[in-house]
């Protein structure tokens, strides 16, 4: 089914350069378009598109769904000094209103986003000194996730929080 939905999305006008998608609580898809900044709801049955909002001021990278149904969109922007600055934006899918949850600090490119079962947000950041960053969903406070220095995470651009295995915390 995922292949057929992706095939459907490719031909849709608002989604000419779709970056990533997430399934909304309604069963519809929410897709961000890195070329236009559009955050679009796609009806999973009909393919009908509805513009939720447009992200401005940078390039959207990824989208995730919080348990409440609120969307998290990551983006990066180029600063005047040539460096990048990452941002995590909360988007209300019903109204399109946007609130910056966390910006700057450890966030550089803010490539991938995932939400843990407890609501904690995890960011994969391809140009930060901290390739994985944990963000408090209430305060936006950032903490580097400890990773070994074996070089396997040199430019991460996606992240998923796996459920805990039996017998492990």
Image: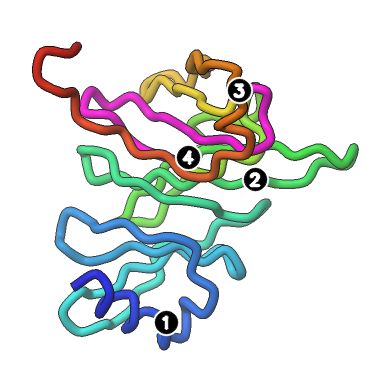
**Mark 4 vs mark 3, CA separation in Å:** 24 Å
Q: Is residue 109 magenta?
A: no
Question: Is 18 situated above or below 45?
Answer: above
**In the displayed structure, does residue 43 sit left or right of residue 139?**
left
Label 1 with label 3: CB-CB less than 8 Å: no
Question: Mark 3 sits on what residue?
Answer: 130
Q: Secondary structure at mark 4?
A: strand
Q: Is residue 123 magenta?
A: yes
Q: Magenta segment range?
A: 113-130
**Dot placed on the residue nearer the N-terminal end, 1 or 2:** 1
Q: Quadrant of the N terminus?
A: bottom left
**Dot placed on the residue nearer the N-terminal end, 4 or 3:** 4
Residue at 66% x, 52% y is 58
Q: Secondary structure at mark 2?
A: strand
Question: Mark 2 sits on what residue?
Answer: 76
Question: Is 53 situated above or below 125?
Answer: below
Which disc is residue 10 wearing? 1
Give the number of the mark in front: 1 or 2: 1
Residue 126 occupies which quadrant of the picture? top right
Residue at 47% x, 51% y is 62
């Amino acid at each position: 089914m995922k292949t057929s939905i992706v095939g459907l999305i490719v031909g849709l006008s608002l989604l000419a350069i779709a970056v990533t998608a997430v399934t909304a609580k309604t069963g519809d898809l929410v897709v961000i378009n890195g070329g236009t900044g559009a955050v679009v709801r796609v009806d999973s049955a009909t393919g009908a598109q509805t513009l939720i909002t447009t992200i401005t001021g940078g390039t959207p990278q990824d989208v995730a769904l919080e348990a409440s149904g609120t969307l998290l969109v990551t983006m990066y922007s180029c600063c005047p000094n040539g460096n990048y600055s990452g941002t995590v934006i909360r988007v209300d899918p019903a109204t399109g209103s946007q609130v910056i949850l966390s910006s700057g600090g450890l966030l550089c490119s803010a490539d991938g986003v995932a939400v843990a079962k407890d609501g904690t947000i995890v960011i994969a950041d391809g140009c930060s000194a901290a390739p994985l960053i944990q963000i408090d969903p209430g305060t936006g406070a950032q903490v580097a996730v400890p990773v070994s220095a074996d070089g396997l995470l040199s430019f991460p651009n996606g992240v998923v929080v796996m459920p805990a295995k039996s017998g492990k915390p």
